[in-house]
Image (cartoon, rainbow, N blue to C red):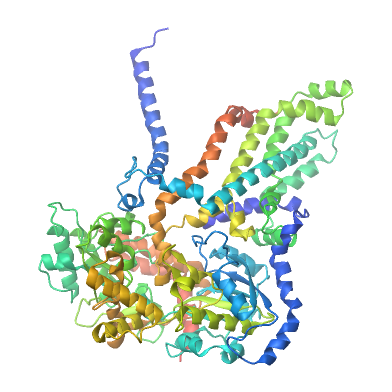
Amino acid sequence: MKRVAYVLATVVALTSLTLAGCSGNNDNASTTPQSQSDAPSSSSSASTGTVAVDADPFGKYDPPIKMTAVNTLIAGNAKFLPGESPSNNIWIKTYADELGIDVNVLWGSDNVDKLTLMVASGDLPDIFALPGDSTMFDQLVDQGQLADLTDVYEKYASPLVKDLMTRDGGRTLEGSKRNGRMYSIPRWHDPIDASLVLWVREDWRVKLSLPEPKTMDDVVAIANAFATQDPDGNNKADTTGLYVSGDGTEPDGYYNLDPIFYGFHAYPNSWVEDASGKLVYGKTQADVMKPALKMLQDMYKNKLIPKEFALKKGEQLEEDTAQGKYGLIYGEYYFPDYPLRSLKQADPKSDWKAYAIVSADDRQAKMPVPGLEILNRFVVRKNAEHPEAVIKMLNLATEKLFGPNADYAKYNIDAQTNRSIWKYTVVQQLMPRQEDNKYVNINKALETKITSSLTTIEKDAYDKVVDYMNNGTLDNWPYFAMYGPGGSIRHHLEYEKDGRLLYDKFTGTLTPAMIENKDALDVRFNDVLVKIIMGSDVNEYDKFVEDWYKLGGDKMTQEANAWYTANKK
Amino acid sequence: MKRSAGKITFDYLNMTILFLISLLCLFPYIHILAVSLSSSASVAEGKVTFWPVDFTMNSYNFVASGSRFMTAFGISAKRVLLGVVIYMIITAITAYPLSKEDRRFKSRTVYVWYFVVTMFVSGGLIPTFLVVRSTGLMDSIWALILPGAVQIFNIVILLNFLRGLPKELEESSFLDGGGHLTYFLRIALPLSVPCLMTLTLFTIVYHWNAWFDGLIYINSPDRYPLQTYIQMNVIEPGRRVRDITDLDVLKTVSQSTLRAAEVLVTSIPVLLAYPFIQKYFITGITLGSVKE
């Protein structure tokens, strides 16, 4: 896709030289960033007035101030009501009504090419968001193009914002800083949400009277029974053991298989410390990777893994789920919402249960999670007139999304039209550990029948869980399977309690060598993974590790270690 | 003349194989058509191949009522119209003088190189972006038209075609008192219709299919041309989603019926244009290729 883009861009570029001087329709030029960024200066007189007011986190500007923004939360498939747009919607209206900030959203798109062009052209809006792992952040900091938000954050951030930002004890907030200063407002959630669990068709397991999966052998036994003992009772051998969905052309493409490696204490996607205290990439630890590969190979040979798994694409996951073809898959806690929901709708008797990942030996399997999970960084232009206005908008967004009077349907997600309204905000933070809290509080409320202490969002989920338990409303089954008694989130809490979470040691933004090679090398791993599973010699993996170092992995390791020595605490 | 049995068999075999091959080309379209006319539930379950299951026109109703799709369709139509007119005028008036011999147009070679060089050396994406931005074209339809308005490739084709016209035509036109304008408008252009039609087709397809420039130069969603709109909507799922609030990206898979309908509607205009231009097509390209 990218290549096509460049070819097309080149074609456009090729022919542009001769007509460069033509100025077309100048009326439309009023929406260019150039003229926009000049706009705030006209209202600069207002800033002196407002600073004097106080450091009220929700203080309204009078007269209103103007800001420009670029919204990269809005994906291409974002939905708007008729007449709405990135710069005309409920959030923008709320900023104007409650804070006196007229936000002009120049554009809204999550396309990275468009963002890169904007940054490269040096014409920055007052506030915009970078992808969390983007090196553009470090570049902009080094070039001194970003405002230092440390002081305005301290002064203006509301208690709720400060609470949400430090839910992990300040780990992420500190990790997002550069030279101890805050150049961005990170939008993050706790890495624990990336944990994986094992989803089992519970009705099949009970029907075939199989034990609960406690060890890797149990998993293989269940896979075997599901594949061979006709769990769906249609007298056809059309079910499969351990399901793999993925796209081998993407890094992380076969992540459903990763927990098998975790069971052998191999962590293919993480930077881990070796015996000498240096960082190594998990994929290079052939001694622990190979036993897992061997097991996968055997499973494939015994037809416990879909025969054509390498050809499946992500979108087939929902299709195969709806047909009830498999009963065992590693996935995130939200799987009931997608894709398992499709089977529940088609076959209400089906039942899924989440289990913790298992180990192949007597050591507990650890669950590797990213070191930091920063999804976006909201950054403010160096000479923006009102950096504190950004904090105020953050306060407001946090209040409307997670505060005591949060209006879910109005500001967060409108279930009726399936619109993610939260994406229209120009700055926001998530509620870290929201899912865990939901689980804990809902289960407490189920026991005590006291719902008064639940937040709006929790109450909403609680009602849905209760509705499923009492009336069996299928639409609400995902809530039950995630937050209900024994729901999938339980395992996140247990992983944490048992000290089984393994945080990635590398938490910097991608280094130059990683940008250049990491994705390609990860895809290369997919290739060797598929080859070995389908029958090649397991020792081919040594060759892969060798190649990995040769093809840029060496440099990546060096850079990761350079970062590690500089940032190790 | 009577054909031998072997020849007849060969013909039939040939036709069968060619027929099968053309069917292969047709199957994807039929599949998309079937998907667009099926209910989304049956598509999700993978029941649809070449015949609609649970026939419904819902997707098309939605496309017709979906304001953004129709707006984008209108923008693209406008773009093609403006693009064809402007591009063809520029191509014609540039190719004509450059087609003259060196003795009539002394620095002709210099000018030709001046144009041709840009086919191989470009300013690059960012400089081009900066130029478009500082000329105030951003977010207007002209940003999609003007930057590519001098299509060197097309100019070279037309140039060669014009050089292939008999010199005598020009001489006699001049003898009869006509100037360059008369010759250009009344003789050269009418004779170049096959070539011009071919280039028109190139231009139509170029403008109809371009999406990247729409993405980078256009900021308001209601000004996106059709292909940019489609490109942003037809997102390949399969990316690992870590945040439950981002699940809506994955859930769009079930909108595959809608996307199929949009893709089909999108391909109609060019399909319609082809039969009318096709008769010029082959003669158009080859005629310019042989020079004296």
Residue at 54% in and 77% down? A377
Q: Position of residue A328 (x, y in %)?
A: 23, 65
Q: Position of residue A197 (x, y in %)?
A: 28, 74
At 53% across and 55% down in the image, what residue appears? Answer: A3
Q: Is residue A196 visible?
A: no
- The residue sitting at the left extreme is A209
As drawn, is B10 to the left or to the right of A129? left
Q: Camera-side residue: B66 or A130? A: B66
Residue A443 sits above or below residue A18 on the image: below
Q: Quadrant of the C terminus of chain A?
A: bottom left
Q: Nearer the viewer, residue A466 or B9?
A: A466
Residue at the farthest top position: B1
Front residue of A370/A106: it is A106
Residue A406, position as x, y percentages in the image: 46, 79
Q: Is residue A28 left or right of residue B233?
A: right
Q: How many numbered badges does the structure rendering display?
A: 0
- Hey, which quadrant is residue A154 in on the image? bottom right
Is B195 placed above or below A446 here? above
Q: Quadrant of residue A416?
A: bottom left
Q: Is residue A71 above or below residue B57?
A: below
* Residue B246 in view of the camera: yes
Classify residue A295 as left or right of residue B122. left
Q: Position of residue B3 (x, y in %)?
A: 39, 11
In this rendered view, identify the residue nearer to me: A214 or B77: B77
